Image: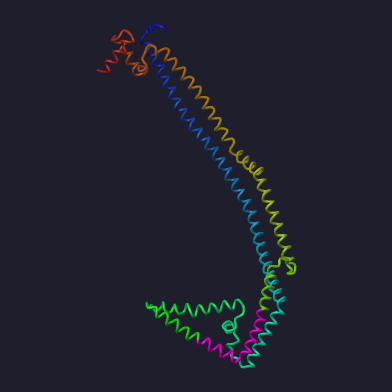
C-alpha cells in the first residue's frame, strides 16, 4: 500500500475515478435499456413473420380444403338424389309386383263381395246385415272379430255406464247399479232382439254370407303374406335398377378419387408448399431481421466490454481509494468536502478529515 504524500491530489484523483465510474454506470443503464428495446423489437419482428406465415398457410390450406369439400358436397348431393330415385323406382316396382302377384286373389275377393251383395239383395236382407260390424257382433269367428266383440262389450256394458255415473257425481252406489241395469236392459235387449229377428228370418243367407266372408278373409291373409314376402325379398334384379346402380357406382368412384386427390393435395401442401410459402416470406424480411440481430449482438458485446471495464474500475477504486476512505465517502461531493477540510488545516490526515466531516454534518 503506497503512502499518501499529497492528500489534495489523492482526493482529486479519487473524485475523478468515482465520476468516471458513475459515467460508466449510466452508460451501462442506457445500453441495457437500448439492448432490451432492440431485443424486444427483434422478437416482435420474428413473431410478426411467424404469424404471417401461419395466417398465410392457414388461409391457403383452408382454400384448398374448401375447394375439395365443395366438390365432395356436390357429389354427395348427386349421390343422394340418385339413391332417392332408385328407392322410388324400387318401391314402384314392389307395388307393381304386389298388384300383379295378388291380382287373382283381389279379383276373387271382388267376385265374392258381389256374390254376397247379390244373395242379400235377392233375399231382401237388410243392408246393415252385410257389414263387418254385424258379423263381428253376431257371427264372430276370427281372432280380430272376437277381440273387437270383447272390446265392444267392455265399452258398452262397463266403461260407458261408469262414465255416466262419474259425470253425474252421485255418491250412492245404487245409481251405478241402476245405470248398469239400464244399459243391460236397453242395449242388451236390443242386441238380443235384433239378433234373433235377423237370424230367425235370414239365418241361412247370413250363414252363407259368413262362409263367403271367410273366403275373403283367407284371401286377404294370403295377400298379406305375399305382400310381406315381396317386401322382404332381397332380390332386386327384377326391378330393372341396374342403370341407377351403375350411376351410383360411378359417383362413388368419383367421390373416392376426389378424396384421394384431396389427401394428396393436403400432403403436398404440408410437405412442399408450406415450406415454399415460409421461405418466400422469410426472404422478404430476412435482411431486416438479420440487421436487427447484428445490432443486438453488437450491443451485447459492447455491454460485456463495458461491464468488464466497470468491474476493473470498481476494483481499482477499491484497491486505491477504498483502503483509505470509507465506502460512504466515495462520492464526489463528500470528496470535495474532505479536500476542503484538508486545505484549511482542520485535519492533518484523512481519518481526522472524515471525523471532522461527520461532526460537521451531525451538529
Q: What is the quadrant of residue 116 in the picture?
A: bottom right
- Give the camera-side residue of 251 and 1: 251
The count of marks equals: 0
Q: Is residue 131 above or below residue 294?
A: below
Expressed as whole percent of the image width and height from the top left, the position of residue 309 reads 48, 19
Q: Is residue 352 left or right of residue 175?
A: left
Question: The N terminus lies in which quarter of the figure?
Answer: top left
Q: Residue at x 54, y 89 (%)?
A: 194
Q: Residue at image x 45%, y 81%?
A: 180
Q: Main secondary structure of the magenta part?
A: helix
Pick whichever, 85 or 332, lies toward us.
Answer: 85
Q: Is residue 167 above or below residue 44?
A: below
Residue plotted at (66% across, 76% down)? 221
Q: Is residue 212 magenta?
A: yes
Q: Nearer the viewer, residue 119 or 308?
A: 119
**Residue 96 place in picture, x, y as percent:** 70, 74
Task: Name the image quarter holding residue 140.
Answer: bottom right
What's the residue at 66%, 46% (across, down)? 267
Residue 360's x, y, as percent? 27, 16
Residue 37 magenta: no
191 left or right, relative to 169: right
Which stretch appears magenta? 189-217
Q: How is the image coloured?
A: rainbow
* Image quarter in which the C terminus is found: top left
Amino acid at each position: 500500500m503506497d503512502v499518501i504524500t499529497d492528500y489534495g491530489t489523492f482526493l482529486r484523483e479519487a473524485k475523478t475515478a468515482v465520476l468516471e465510474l458513475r459515467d460508466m454506470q449510466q452508460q451501462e443503464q442506457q445500453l441495457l435499456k437500448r439492448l432490451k428495446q432492440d431485443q424486444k423489437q427483434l422478437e416482435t419482428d420474428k413473431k410478426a413473420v411467424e404469424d404471417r406465415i401461419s395466417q398465410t398457410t392457414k388461409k391457403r390450406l383452408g382454400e384448398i380444403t374448401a375447394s375439395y369439400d365443395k366438390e365432395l358436397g356436390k357429389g354427395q348431393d348427386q349421390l343422394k338424389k340418385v339413391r332417392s330415385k332408385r328407392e322410388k323406382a324400387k318401391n314402384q316396382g314392389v307395388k307393381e309386383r304386389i298388384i300383379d302377384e295378388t291380382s287373382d286373389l283381389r279379383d276373387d275377393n271382388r267376385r265374392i263381395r258381389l256374390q254376397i251383395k247379390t244373395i242379400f239383395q235377392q233375399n231382401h236382407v237388410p243392408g246393415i246385415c252385410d257389414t263387418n260390424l254385424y258379423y263381428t257382433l253376431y257371427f264372430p269367428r276370427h281372432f280380430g272379430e272376437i277381440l273387437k266383440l270383447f272390446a265392444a262389450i267392455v265399452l258398452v256394458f262397463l266403461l260407458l255406464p261408469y262414465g255416466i255415473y262419474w259425470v253425474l257425481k252421485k255418491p250412492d252406489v245404487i245409481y251405478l247399479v241402476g245405470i248398469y241395469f239400464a244399459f243391460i236392459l236397453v242395449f242388451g235387449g236390443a242386441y238380443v232382439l235384433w239378433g234373433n229377428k235377423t237370424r230367425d228370418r235370414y239365418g241361412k243367407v247370413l250363414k252363407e254370407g259368413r262362409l263367403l266372408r271367410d273366403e275373403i278373409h283367407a284371401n286377404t291373409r294370403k295377400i298379406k303374406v305375399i305382400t310381406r314376402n315381396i317386401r322382404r325379398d332381397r332380390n332386386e334384379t327384377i326391378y330393372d335398377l341396374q342403370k341407377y346402380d351403375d350411376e351410383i357406382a360411378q359417383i362413388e368412384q368419383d367421390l373416392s378419387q376426389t378424396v384421394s386427390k384431396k389427401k394428396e393435395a393436403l400432403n403436398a401442401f404440408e410437405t412442399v408448399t408450406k415450406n415454399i410459402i415460409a421461405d418466400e416470406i422469410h426472404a422478404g424480411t430476412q435482411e431486416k431481421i438479420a440487421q436487427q440481430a447484428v445490432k443486438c449482438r453488437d450491443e451485447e458485446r459492447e455491454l460485456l466490454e463495458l461491464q468488464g471495464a466497470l468491474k476493473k474500475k470498481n476494483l481499482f477504486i477499491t484497491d486505491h481509494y477504498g483502503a483509505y476512505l470509507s465506502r460512504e465517502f466515495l462520492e464526489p461531493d463528500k470528496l470535495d468536502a474532505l479536500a476542503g477540510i484538508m486545505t484549511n488545516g482542520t485535519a492533518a490526515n484523512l481519518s481526522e478529515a472524515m471525523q471532522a466531516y461527520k461532526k460537521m454534518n451531525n451538529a
